Image (tube, rainbow, N blue to C red):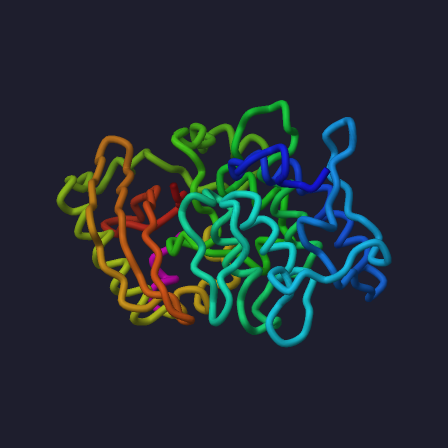
Amino acid sequence: MPVVTGYGVLSADDAARLLLPVAESVAAVHAPAGGHGAISPAAIEVDAHGRALLLDRARVAPDPAFTAPGAPDDVWSLAAVLLHATTGEPPAPGGTPVVPRTTGWLAPLIELGLRPDARDRPSAAEVADYLRARVAPASGGRRFPIAGLVAAGAAVVAVLGIVGAALLFTGGGEEDPPPRTKASEATSRGEDVPTAAVPSAGPTPPTAAELEDFARDYVATASGDPALGITWLTRAYQQRSPRYRQVWASIRDPRILSVSGDPTAMQVRYTYRYRLPGGGSRTEDITLFLVQDGSRLLIADAVAR
């Protein structure tokens, strides 16, 4: 049975769980510098146990709607299948496809996979790592926050690592992130984890208005000068964000639509819209988790909805 036929349009979680074995198969094919060359919904079957299987290349023909412009690329085709599974439609022909928000947290992965330049796309192994980190174990029902993704999928973070921009960790659902580890607990385990949501005893805690101004200033700084923007992060968060500069350099004309600060939780949530390099725009809802370093605020973590 083809992957979407009989299933309808899938949620991001369901699409990821269904297609993770396919991504793993593609990664296995690529490991010895190989390739499939004909990935499309017609090349994927679901067995009696609900497991999606990638058919052998000899059994299927390439589908132009799922073939990358220029040279065929399995990662582009896999991203196109993820788009199809979550929207019911293949990528629009010509230019950089616009990925709708209905694709949920898969949107940034799909966007990167459909980049016109193959050098900007993640590898098949990194796609599999990202899907695995978000949906495994399937029975847990818990979405990983950023820190969990770093532990569970370090390889994909190296390619898709993003802070503040929300191109990577998008659409995490309506759940709040799990409580941060207390500093005393982290120290007892020898971890270097920044304290969050606990202002230091010395400085005066910021007001809601100050947190909101911080968010506005941060977006303007990061988009205008990514090298300066990264200094607004804690050292630990900087180390988890190897592609920070490249990502923010690709965000054009960001505009804050709404912002709300929560001094008690040391959080600020904002919604902003920005233009994409290849055309189109995205709107993201971001929550920054802040800490105080003396009189200065720093970003210790971030999630996107």
Residue 59 falls left or right of residue 130:
right
Which residue lies at the image location 22% right of the left edge and 52% below the top edge? 214
Our reading of the magenta stretch's main secondary structure is helix
Residue 75 as seen in the image, left or right of residue 296: right
Q: Position of residue 209 (x, y in %)?
A: 13, 44
Q: Nearer the viewer, residue 188 or 221?
A: 221
Quadrant where the C terminus lies? top left
The residue sitting at 73% across, 42% down in the picture is 21
Residue 279 locus on image (x, y percent): 38, 69
Viewer can see residue 235: no
Q: Is residue 56 above or below residue 223?
A: above
Q: Which residue is pictured at 40% across the width and 69% down the height?
A: 250
* Image location (x, y in percent) of residue 70: 63, 76
Q: Provide residue 218's location: percent of width, then percent of height.
A: 27, 58
User: Does any portion of residue 44 appear in the rendered image?
Assistant: yes
Left or right of 155 on screen, residue 259: left
Determine which quarter of the picture holds residue 126: bottom right
Q: Quadrant of the N terminus?
A: top right
In the picture shown, does residue 5 fall above or below 75? above
**Residue 231 on the magenta segment:** yes
The structure residue drawn at horizontal position 71% and vertical position 56%, both measured from the top left corner, is: 39
- Residue 57, above or below 205: below
Q: How many numbered tags mark residues here?
A: 0
Q: Nearer the viewer, residue 142 or 99?
A: 99
- The range drawn in magenta is 228-235
The quarter of the picture where residue 98 lies is bottom left
Q: Nearer the viewer, residue 164 or 35?
A: 35
State yes or no: residue 119 in magenta: no
Of 207 and 24, nearer the camera is 24
